[in-house]
Image (cartoon, helix red, strand yellow):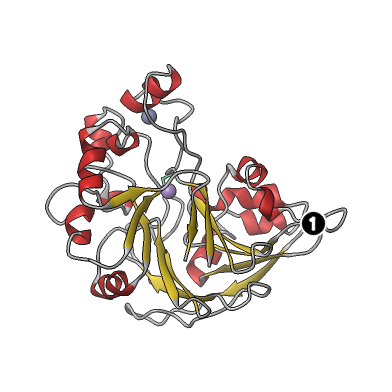
Amino acid sequence: MLIHVLGSGAGGGFPQWNCNCHNCNRLRKGNFKGQARTQSSIAASTNGTDWVLFNASPDILGQLQHFPAIQPGRALRDTGIRGIVLLDSQIDHTTGLLMLREHHRPLDIYCTESVHQDLTTGNPLFKVLEHYCTVNWHPLQLPQGDAPGEGFQVEGIEGLRLTPVPLRSEAPPYSPHRHNYHVGDTIGLWLEDPATQKSLFYAPGLGQIEDHVLSLMEKADCLLIDGTFWTEDEMERAGITQKRATEMGHLPQSGQGGMISVLAPLTSPWKILIHINNTNPILDEESLERAQLEAAGIEVAFDGMDIIL
Ligand code: MLT
Ligand code: MN
Ligand code: ZN
């Protein structure tokens, strides 16, 4: 399978338009060793022409322009996008759908009932799209509890098997499920390519390492997982907001029980962090925190990164 990282930043991207934190400020002034990042989304393919998107970021138009393989140019109106899987209903993962409204047929969108509910009420993108290309919703089934849902395939993406994995993270502020967890508010995706027998676990919003999540992480060939914050109180320390990482549904990297310690005993997977917030010191390639990650064998996704499995 081919994975292309369209965007690797968290909500707001890097630099964030109104932010003058230690990272954003230095990047703007050209005094920073590290890259700008758009808001997180990836594309997957098995043939290099037909792609499934995972989330649709508000930065999608620029992301597609920087990725010529997704525009095969076979007709006056064309795209290599065969379907879109939404992992939650957050603004940074969904509002790019509006930018795809010129599609010449309904958008094939795969998401849970809970995400569908938010996208027809609090964040009514599907309602808006009814006036344009419309949406062909493919419901993702999840049993109650923590068992993975049924595996599915996106039409046109030959072979790639996708399985939704329920995650305890956080529904967005406009959701009736905010601070009131329901199965399906946030999912991760287990991707398997039978042709290569390789697997990837994609989870940009990972609030807790539940047992079923850990078992998947142990057997994955590649992990592309939540790298939002370095510390639990990172936003507070930066003087931005008192919201804590776990309150927002993100497990920080440092500290006891943090992502670095969770990943340490896992010997087989390729470990990559994605959905990096602009306040996170790991964005600075010369930081001690980035050196700590490197020493732990953990990479940081960047816009345009290709992962071949
Ligand atoms: C999050 O990941 O917690 C959200 O995307 C934050 C936001 O975009 O407001
Ligand atoms: Mn986000
Ligand atoms: Zn910033």
Q: Residue at x 30, y 52 (%)?
A: 250
Q: Position of residue 237 (x, y in %)?
A: 22, 31
Q: Position of residue 3 (x, y in %)?
A: 52, 59
Q: Residue at x 27, y 47 (%)?
A: 245
Q: Which residue is mark 1?
A: 78
Choose between 83 and 286: the one closer to the eye: 286
Q: Is residue 21 above or below residue 146?
A: above
Q: Is residue 188 above or below residue 11?
A: below
- Could you tell me if residue 237 is visible in this image? yes
Secondary structure at badge 1 equals loop
Residue 214 position by quadrant: bottom left
Choose between 140 and 81: the one closer to the eye: 81
- State the residue lying farthest toward the top: 29
* Side of 124 where 227 appears, left or right: left
Crowd tier of the residue under label 1, counting other residues whose Cα lies within 10 Å: few below 14, some 14–19, many 20 or above = few
Residue 271 position by quadrant: bottom left
Q: Residue at x 57, y 44 (%)?
A: 58
- Could you tell me if residue 128 is visible in this image? no
Residue 181 position by quadrant: bottom left
Q: Position of residue 46 (x, y in %)?
A: 59, 69
Q: Is residue 238 above or below residue 54?
A: above
Choose between 48 and 209: the one closer to the eye: 48
